Image: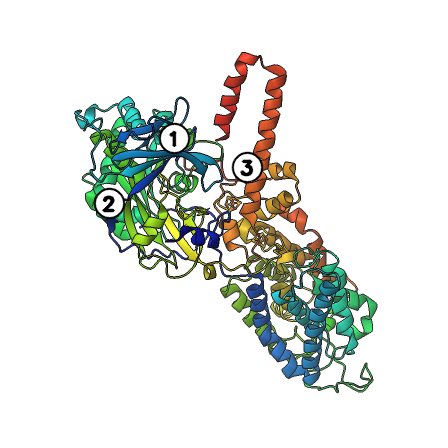
């Protein structure tokens, strides 16, 4: 054989020479797939306008990311799908009645301010979609607290905030004022209630969550400890007599499932150790319950996740694994 | 049946395509290229001159003092050249080139031992093993005599490592199926010498047929335990085997005898038996030739020093343009830049990958903090942070995070979705840290040590670092 020719073709790199085919790209698309049921339900419940908001938000985030990277002359990484996930998540935690420009402003905040200025994917400290939601909520509280009843299909362009549509109290808002929500539990679990586009149907969110767990895209620790903590605290400190009903309401209404399954589990802003994830989930749960019970807002998921995001480095350090070696177990076997 | 295992690790596709193929003797090569350094330790000095006629099995190079193992002529013939060239690791090594005369004249020095099996002492074994030039055949190539010597009198567990956790490689599997008695006899011999009443053979559960073959070769099942391990990478790492079988954790930088264990590779054990009983030096070994470019993957019995290009030719050549040639497994093996590189004592496989085997998905890897590397690291480190600190040049933080505990198994890089070159970066940082320490030590020596002692202390330092 002509060895000179062959040697030219050879690449020398340091091992390992194999790579698991999973990439950031495939993981992000798994998340998108897992969000399809909840998004579809949102569109089914809140009409065409919900679909437009979702697509608009996804397109805007990708466009902001691509434009920023293009103008900063850094590699354009929109193909990894993370901007799509951010755009979708942001749309899913907005009510259907928000003006069309609102998600675009939110995407700008999420992609440019929270993600890219910190250095792009993997470098941001808080979850971009959560941060944008909190930002929008503080800037335009009215828009984010007006919920439409299911089935009321809103026109695309009309005078926001749609004075003549039915505004509906969400189950959480009712709980806040100390009432049992008017909707029955079955409707709440299925998603026949007022709320943001993506958070209403617990069934659909759980289906997506199971998909992620089966694919091992998301590990069980964060959702289980988050939801478990909320359940436990609601059980121990019920705000009304019907304890079990109350626990179920706390779990299935509001943004808890969307947050616990899809937002708190964002890799970039959650701990890398297993025990760290349990602590982080529990922390999210505690803060959520405290805000729901004692705060001024009916919902606390976004704030809880954002606060815990800030603590991730400390949790990682606190739960740093003990290095292999030095321990003598089962000695003398 | 109980499955022994450890915490962490990954499951790369096994690709044990050659597991069903019996080992065939490769035709003898025209020329062999014997590197003077095929082991950890000092390189050998040549003991022959150009033009000398050599026997098969004759010692042609040896180390003067310190750690090392002699090298032998693996065919009979004439020394054609002694030259220096660069090996795969980038070091300059001497090679002795021998022109084969195909007469297979065996060195008269090689005589079977006349002792009865129970008469062997540790000194007999150590000197026979040293003379035979045996070095860890799993790929680590640590001189085996030194390992035996340091472990003598200190061990309770004698473990033969047949885990073979690297993808593609099946040489140990074939050895267990075709010649289980070589492993069992070797182990029995060592048990006698070490005064142990029990020995262990560790096999992964993707090779249950081999475990059975071993069991049927064992006459007294009370003496030898065949332990079945979960199939997982890096199960074959010394530390992980020890942990799985005994629950003892061995920190890096320490040797197995410190936790009363001695772990030897399957082929090494067979070679020890050959050396002690028949006086046969290590001149050939089994090699798996596989990879998506190889026309007919095979298991071969190859003389050391045979160029890998001849192995590939014997396996029907290549079906497409090679991208990488790897000696050793795809997880820890070394990519070659020269297709004529010879088979050495640690070459358990030659794997040829085409371009489409390893795609880079991102040229701008950015850790997404997914935590997989942390979950998979068998040494329980935080590879993502080690990478970040190393890339940032924060070597002291790397040390604080136990970078020196990394065994460079590559599990982290294998499973990283963001394609971050974690272990590659760690390896470079470890090199830098070692260098700094050496420099500091040298500076210290210059300041404090009287000149006569300088050599001595340098040697000491070198030994500790290996
Ligand atoms: S950090 Fe080192 S020991 Fe841990 S998985 Fe990576 S290569 Fe293996
Ligand atoms: S596996 Fe890769 S992406 Fe995940 S934490 Fe480790 S370095 Fe980061």
Q: Chain of mark 3?
A: B
Alpha carbons under labels 1 and 3: distance apart: 23 Å
Q: Specify the label residue B260 is tagged with.
A: 1
Q: Position of residue B25 (x, y in %)?
A: 24, 47
Q: Position of residue B141 (x, y in %)?
A: 39, 36
At horizontal 67% and vertical 49% (from top left) the residue drawn is A313
Alpha carbons under labels 1 and 2: distance apart: 24 Å
Q: What kind of element bears circle 3?
A: helix
Other residues around mark 2 within 10 Å, as few (<14) / some (14–19) / many (≥20): many
Quick check: B265 above or below A25?
above
Q: Nearer the viewer, residue B112 or A176?
A: B112
Q: Is residue B434 visible?
A: yes
Query: Which label lies toward us, 1 or 2?
Result: 2
Q: Nearer the viewer, residue B14 or A149?
A: B14
Judged left or right of residue B109, residue B206 is right
Judged left or right of residue A114, residue B59 is left
Lower sequence index among marks 1 and 3: 1
In the rendered structure, are the residues bearing label 2 and label 3 in contact, judged by CB atoms less than 8 Å apart?
no
Query: Which label lies toward us, 2 or 3?
Result: 3
Q: Which of the 4 image quarters holds residue A188?
A: bottom right
For disc 2, the marked residue is: B214
Lower sequence index among marks 2 and 3: 2
Quick check: B273 above or below A153?
above
Q: Specify the label residue B404 is tagged with.
A: 3
In the rendered structure, are the residues bearing label 1 and label 2 in contact, judged by CB atoms less than 8 Å apart?
no
Q: Which of the 4 image quarters holds residue B271?
A: top left
Quick check: A94 above or below B302?
below
At horizontal 34% and vertical 24% (from top left) the residue drawn is B153
Lower sequence index among marks 1 and 2: 2
Same-subunit check for callouts 1 and 3:
yes
């Amino acid at each position: 054989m002509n060895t000179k020719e062959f040697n030219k073709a050879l690449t020398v790199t340091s091992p390992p020479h194999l790579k698991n085919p999973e990439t950031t790209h495939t993981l992000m698309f798994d998340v998108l797939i897992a969000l399809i049921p909840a998004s579809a339900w949102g569109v089914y419940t809140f009409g065409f306008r919900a679909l437009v908001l979702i697509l608009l938000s996804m397109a805007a985030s990708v466009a902001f990311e691509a434009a920023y990277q293009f103008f900063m002359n850094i590699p354009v990484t929109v193909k990894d799908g993370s901007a799509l996930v951010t755009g979708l998540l942001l749309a899913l935690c907005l009510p259907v009645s928000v003006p069309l420009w609102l998600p675009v402003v939110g995407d700008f905040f999420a992609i440019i301010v929270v993600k890219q200025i910190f250095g792009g994917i993997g470098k941001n400290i808080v979850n971009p979609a959560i941060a944008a939601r909190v930002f929008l909520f503080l800037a335009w509280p009215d828009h984010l607290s007006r919920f439409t009843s299911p089935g009321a299909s809103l026109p695309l362009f009309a005078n926001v905030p749609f004075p003549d549509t039915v505004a509906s109290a969400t189950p959480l808002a009712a709980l806040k004022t100390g009432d049992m929500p008017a909707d029955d539990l079955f409707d709440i679990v299925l998603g026949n209630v007022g709320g943001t586009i993506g958070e209403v149907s617990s069934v659909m969110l759980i289906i997506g969550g199971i998909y992620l767990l089966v694919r091992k895209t998301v590990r069980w620790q964060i959702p289980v400890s988050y939801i478990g903590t909320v359940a436990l605290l609601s059980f121990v400190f019920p705000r009304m007599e019907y304890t079990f009903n109350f626990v179920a309401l706390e779990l299935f209404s509001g943004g808890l499932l969307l947050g616990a399954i899809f937002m708190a589990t964002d890799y970039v802003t959650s701990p890398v150790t297993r025990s760290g994830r349990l602590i982080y989930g529990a922390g999210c749960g505690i803060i959520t319950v405290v805000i729901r019970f004692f705060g001024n807002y009916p919902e606390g998921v976004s704030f809880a996740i954002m606060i815990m995001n800030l603590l991730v480095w400390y949790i990682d350090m606190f739960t740093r694994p003990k290095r292999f070696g030095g321990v003598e177990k089962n000695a003398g076997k | 049946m109980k499955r022994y295992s450890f915490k962490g690790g990954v499951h790369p596709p096994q690709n044990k395509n050659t597991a069903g193929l019996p080992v065939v003797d490769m035709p003898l090569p025209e020329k062999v290229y014997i590197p003077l350094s095929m082991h950890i330790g000092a390189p050998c000095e040549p003991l022959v001159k150009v033009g000398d006629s050599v026997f098969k099995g004759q010692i042609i190079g040896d180390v003067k003092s310190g750690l090392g193992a002699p090298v032998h002529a693996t065919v009979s013939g004439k020394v054609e050249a002694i030259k220096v060239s660069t090996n795969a690791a980038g070091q300059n090594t001497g090679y002795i080139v021998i022109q084969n005369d195909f007469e297979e004249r065996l060195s008269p020095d090689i005589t079977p031992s006349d002792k009865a099996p129970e008469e062997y002492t540790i000194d007999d074994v150590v000197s026979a093993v040293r003379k035979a030039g045996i070095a860890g055949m799993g790929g680590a190539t640590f001189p085996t005599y030194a390992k035996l010597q340091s472990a003598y009198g200190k061990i309770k567990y004698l473990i033969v490592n047949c885990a073979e956790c690297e993808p593609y490689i099946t040489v140990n599997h074939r050895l267990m199926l075709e010649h289980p008695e070589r492993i069992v006899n070797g182990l029995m011999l060592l048990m006698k010498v070490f005064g142990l009443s029990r020995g262990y053979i560790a096999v992964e559960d993707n090779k249950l047929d081999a475990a059975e073959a071993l069991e049927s070769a064992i006459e007294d099942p009370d003496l030898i335990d065949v332990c079945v391990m979960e199939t997982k990478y890096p199960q074959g790492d010394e530390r992980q085997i020890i942990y799985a079988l005994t629950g003892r954790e061995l920190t890096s930088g320490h040797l197995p005898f410190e936790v009363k264990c001695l772990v030897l590779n399957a082929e090494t054990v067979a070679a020890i038996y050959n050396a002690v009983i028949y006086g046969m030096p290590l001149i050939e070994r089994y090699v798996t030739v596989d990879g998506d470019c190889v026309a007919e993957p095979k298991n071969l019995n190859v003389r050391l020093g045979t160029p890998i290009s001849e192995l590939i030719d014997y396996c029907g050549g290549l079906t497409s343009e090679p991208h990488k040639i790897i000696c050793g497994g795809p997880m820890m093996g070394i990519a070659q830049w020269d297709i004529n590189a010879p088979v050495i004592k640690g070459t358990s496989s030659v794997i040829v990958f085409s371009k489409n085997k390893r795609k880079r998905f991102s040229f701008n890897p950015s850790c997404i903090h997914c935590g997989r590397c942390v979950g998979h690291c068998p040494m329980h480190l935080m590879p993502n942070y080690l990478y970040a600190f190393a890339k940032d040049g924060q070597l002291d933080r790397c040390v604080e995070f136990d970078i020196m505990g990394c065994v460079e198994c590559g599990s982290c890089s294998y499973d990283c979705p963001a394609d971050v070159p974690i272990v590659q970066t760690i390896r470079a940082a470890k090199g830098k840290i070692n260098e700094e320490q050496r420099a500091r030590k040298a500076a210290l020596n210059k300041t404090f040590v009287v000149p006569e002692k300088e050599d001595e202390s340098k040697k000491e330092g070198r030994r500790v670092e290996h």
